[in-house]
Image (tube, grey):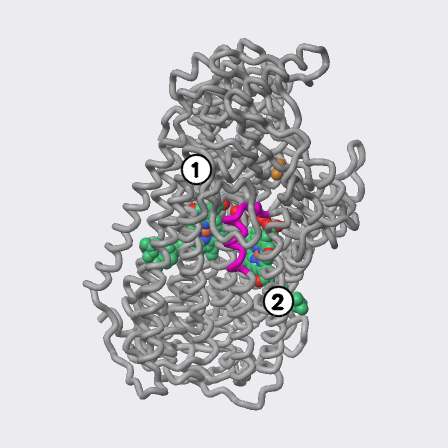
Amino acid sequence: MTSGGIRRSFAAWAGLAFALFGGAVQAAPHPWQLNMERGASTWSQVPYHLNNISLGVCVVIGVLVFGAMFIAMFRFRKSRGAVAETWSHNTKLEIVWTTIPVLILIVLAYLATGGLTSWADTTGSQMTVKVTGYQWKWRYDYISYHGKPIEKVGFMSKLDKLSNETRQLDSGMNPYAVKVGNQNTYLLNVDKPLVVPINTKIRFLITGGDVIHSWWVPALGWKLDAIPGIINAAWTNIKTPGTYRGQCAELCGQDHGFMPIVVVAKSKADFAKWLAEQEAKSARPAAATAAATPAAAAAKTLQLAAVPSKAKQG
Amino acid sequence: MSHAATHDQHDDHHGAPKNFFQRWCMSTNHKDIGTLYLIFALTMFFIGGSFAMVIRAELFKPGLQLVQPYFFNEMTTMHALVMIFGAIMPAFVGLGNWMIPLMVGAPDMALPRMNNLSFWILPFAFTLLLSTLFMPGGGPAGGWTMYPPLSLQSDSLAYVVFAIHLMGISSIMGAINIIATILNMRAPGMDLLKMPVFVWSWLITAFLLIAVMPVLAGAVTMLLTDKYFGTNFFNPGGGGDPVLYQHIFWFFGHPEVYIMILPAFGIISEVIPTFARKPIFGYKAMVFAIASIAFLSFIVWAHHMFAVGLPLGADIFFMYATMLIAVPTGVKVFNWVATMWGGSMTFETPMLFAVAFVILFTIGGFSGLMLALVPADFQYQDTYFVVAHFHYVLVTGALFAIISATYYWLPKWSGRMYSEFWGKVHFWNSVVWVNVLFFPQHFLGLAGMPRRIPDYNVAFANFNMISSIGGFLFGASQLIFLGVLIHGVFFSKKKATDRVWEGAKGLEWTVPSPAPHHTFEVPPVIHDEELAHGNVNA
Amino acid sequence: MKSPGCYLGAKVIKRSPRGLIMSQQHDAYFVPVASYWPFVAAVVMFTTMFGAAHWLNAAPGETGFGKTVWLVGMVGVLAMFFGWFRSVIRESLAGSYNHQVDTSFRMGMMWFIFSEVMFFGAFFGALFYIRMFSVPWLGGEGHGVLTHQFLWNDYAASWGANGGNGPQHLGGAFRTVPAWGLPLLNTLILLSSSVTVTIAHHALRAGHRGKILLFLGLTVLLGALFVNFQAHEYIEAYHELNLTLHSGVYGSTFFLLTGFHGLHVTLGTIMLAVIWFRVLKGHFSKEHHFGFEAVAWYWHFVDVVWLGLFLFVYIL
Ligand code: HEA
Ligand code: HEA
Ligand code: CUA
Ligand SMILES: [Cu+2]
């Protein structure tokens, strides 16, 4: 019956072990993964540590409470001749076990508030990308990079062909055979990934084209809903080059499970090269579909970068 | 004390009507109506459970094997709607119907005919809801939360909305009845602060129901008009906001989840003292904690919306308020443990389920607390971590409490003892498999598996398979439950005594087993030592 | 006695009122006999809802059989109310309802009204959210800076005629109903009706039948007048102001709030009329007139909601 408690502490130890020895950045989930990944951005440590700390706190409280309960169940059973006491309240005790949780919660709240405040601050970003969710694909529009507006770099990104064929009902195809290198990418690969530079504070403007979607790459540490008619903003600053995989995280209809997200982070030099290629391509007509992002808007964005774009309200 | 079965001048009314239609469709008897509710809830539990089995079967391994994605979404949606509105809530109302009048010494519910209407709406409401599965456009597939604009794409929206209106009407009337019964029908001497905790928990739950079911009705009405009458509540083009729906829905939705747990707290607070043979520890604190949880439940709704892009201040407010709920809930957990401490315990089936409740519900509460931390929730939101959280509080919380209550009071209802052996078999199977079913879902969520998806990357395969196996076996274990119930109601040879359990206290144990069709026609004289909580606040 | 249609065979159970001990005076508690009305109610409610849903889903231009089913359901609902209340009134006249039953009824009505308050609360909440957050945000205030900049660049948010229908100006340009015309008149009408119903109540307690009938009758007339004016207002809104259900969120909140309120006034008026006939038939006594009071409470509730509407929908 301790199964719950033991497993929980098992998870905590596994998490701890992972934190200590799992140094390498995980770009995609791996089999038997027990804990959240550490992430690859400057901010992604926040949820990771909060997760571990709060888990640890809960395990400790759990051990104490369930421990006391098991002792009670062992010591005070009728079959051992226990005779029931008659007392039924103790105000001091009640005060103690009201106050202690409050103190613990204050600590957790303090940590969480700090992390949240830094997340909400999109000021000073060096690059802006607009993300639009559609049933069932993503659209990426590059809006500005290092103060310069980018024109007509934008594309759709949808589930890769192999995954898509494999995932059909009774396709007879093997999900395990969908691979990139030695990584299993079934349902986690796209035809055209989002390419971004590392060590750059990138601001994402996230919106929806039809219904609500949610843009989530676990390695970046957050997800944010893509709501039609509304722009949500968040930022990331990726530390290591790599390929980071995620999925749409808000139910958006029948193919909600089939609209993955892939972010490829390149060194600044490589990214500059890539961007130049894209711009050259789009200079030829009909390369990009209606990006709907006038340069004027992009220019305004830059002015805006100076003021906090998440106005504080309460 | 005066025996409930004492005769008055209306002997001819003592028995139940013989005519089937008269007895069951026209009833004004709280026990018969309670029975109807319980049977209905059990049926719905099996229906909702079969939908869950479809979900678990499809998720057994990667790749789509059984159903199309759209149908999968219908299953997820229906599973939740049926379980919440069809199984858990009616089961609690059924228990309330049966036990509240017995516990407070009332002859019946305050408004018996309305009581019958509250019940009979339900089978019709669910006919309406479930019929959509057979319609050309299919059933609702936007999740039980029905977020627009997605839910507006569904052809069955009107049916679902009206079904929810009906359920709402039923719940509101049921709740009004319970409040009126508790406030107006108590036997002389049954002071508010001597009432069983179960009755208190229902009083507060009923208040929550009346406060939030109309809000849900309003929310789905706006969906209806947005789809069929061209309004723009949830359309930014017209000045509206899809997020507005989420605010209104969760203003209902969060109190709703406490509607599903407060009566469970009440049940556990009856069962543990009985089998610990010791009065509940901190009666007043327990009542106060329930009231605080109910109050807080109104100001935490946006914790379901941390990822929609709320203003920073709102995120912080809702985080703090949500975390606060851990305090009164903790008080309850600690008080249950303190009740066991120094007791003289035995572990019959109801007690086993109650003990499992305390541990497993607390684990669910812990993951709830983790979800409340906004930056962490940015990762957890809409993953299987959330699914694990709410099944721990709902299945091993609400459902286990209902099962515990069923074993606890079944002898009083049927007059026969159920089989303790098979009850224990049911318990051990349930408690093992439910953990195999839901515990790995924490890992899946942490590793990044979104919820509401019919298929997944192969990295999630191992734990999904384990979870599915746990699911099938947990489902199969409920067949044992069904067997124990049928045996215990119809076939068991062992007669139940009036008190049934050695340590049981309270008015319900002073009437014969099975409880006669009418009880407390003459109000009982209350002796404080007869009550479970008669002297606790002395 | 055994027939389900007979409501006079109410079951009387001996009961001592709370606070008295057994040897003191016995009151009787009333458990009504079985009745088929609740079951009938469930059936007709289902019929209505099913019909309505089917009707709504019918292909454009046709009504399918949904409308028919809905109509049958509605007739059933009316018949059910009539039958159920008739039996309740008979029981009440037979004196079966004692003090405790009366209290249960009162609690029932009070909590029912509370649930109605919460129902309106959902719509008022939507109105406040839309006015305080969603529209300003779309217009670029505070949290909505980016939304405005990237999606609705030329939207100047404001409530009412300029902007109340959102950035896409849905439903086209419209004008709002000025608060100080018909709405003001309607406010005065409802306020006076509150006064008249209270006078009628006092008259009832004092036993002046003529006065009751007069003032209750006046209340009914005022209620009908209100509904009449509101209908005019709607016609004007549609035909002259181009204010329709499609006029963005302004139209949505305006028509749903005033519409649900109007529906409640209509129901309240019907209930008042029924009570008027019951007074005529002498159903109420000085002490025993819960039916009257319930309807009066309901009327006051409808009145208070209107004040909220007048303030938040029309004036502000
Ligand atoms: C019975 C139902 C029930 C109950 C009781 C709870 C209880 C709680 N829930 Fe849960 N919840 C759900 C049902 C329930 N929930 C459902 C159905 C959903 C998903 C809906 C959907 O999206 O479909 C959900 C989702 C949900 C979310 C949103 C997740 C997301 O979508 O991202 C959050 C976030 O804050 C949350 C938090 C909490 C908290 C803090 C509690 C607290 O009440 C828990 C308090 C209890 C304890 C903490 C344990 C005991 C306490 C102690 C031993 C004291 C000491 C402890 C500490 C100091 C830590 N819940
Ligand atoms: C009160 C609530 C309640 C209860 C009791 C349950 C019970 C169960 N739930 Fe569920 N569940 C929810 C409320 C509940 N759930 C909610 C609110 C959601 C969210 C929906 C959404 O996202 O919109 C959800 C979602 C949900 C999901 C996620 C779906 C998705 O995201 O796509 C899953 C997946 O495993 C699941 C599984 C189960 C299982 C296996 C059980 C089991 O406990 C069921 C066991 C019962 C039976 C199986 C029935 C009885 C037995 C038989 C019929 C015999 C035959 C069976 C066999 C022989 C195997 N539930
Ligand atoms: Cu897009 Cu889910
Ligand atoms: Cu909640």
- The magenta span reads B438-451
Q: Where on the picture, by quarter, is residue C16?
A: bottom left
- Pinpoint residue B358: horizontal percent, then vertical percent: 40, 66
The quarter of the rendered structure image containing the C terminus of chain A is top left
In the picture, the disc for residue B475 is 2
**Label 2 within 8 A of ligand 2 by Cβ:** yes
Q: Amino acid at mark 1?
A: Ser
Where C262 sits versus B390, above or below?
above
- Pinpoint residue B167: horizontal percent, then vertical percent: 58, 53
- Mark 2 surroundings within 10 Å by alpha-carbon count, few (fewer than 14), some (14 through 19), many (20 or more): many
Q: Residue furthest left?
A: A92
> Principal SS element in the magenta part?
helix
Q: Is residue B343 left or right of residue A193?
A: left
Q: Is residue C171 left or right of residue C219?
A: right
Element at badge 2?
A: helix
- Mark 1 surroundings within 10 Å by alpha-carbon count, few (fewer than 14), some (14 through 19), many (20 or more): many
In the picture, the disc for residue A248 is none
Q: Where on the picture, by quarter, is residue B41?
A: bottom right
- Pinpoint residue C278: horizontal percent, then vertical percent: 53, 51
Visible residue check, residue B208: no
Q: Amino acid at mark 2?
A: Gly
Element at badge 1?
A: loop
Where C159 sits versus C94, above or below?
above
Visible residue check, residue C239: yes
**Magenta highlight on residue B298:** no
> Residue at image x 29%, y 82%?
A84
Indicate the chain on which mark 1 is placed.
A
**Magenta highlight on residue B439:** yes
Q: Which of labels 1 and 2 is toward the front?
A: 1
* Cα–Cα gap, marks 1 and 2: 39 Å
The residue indicated by pointer 1 is: A44
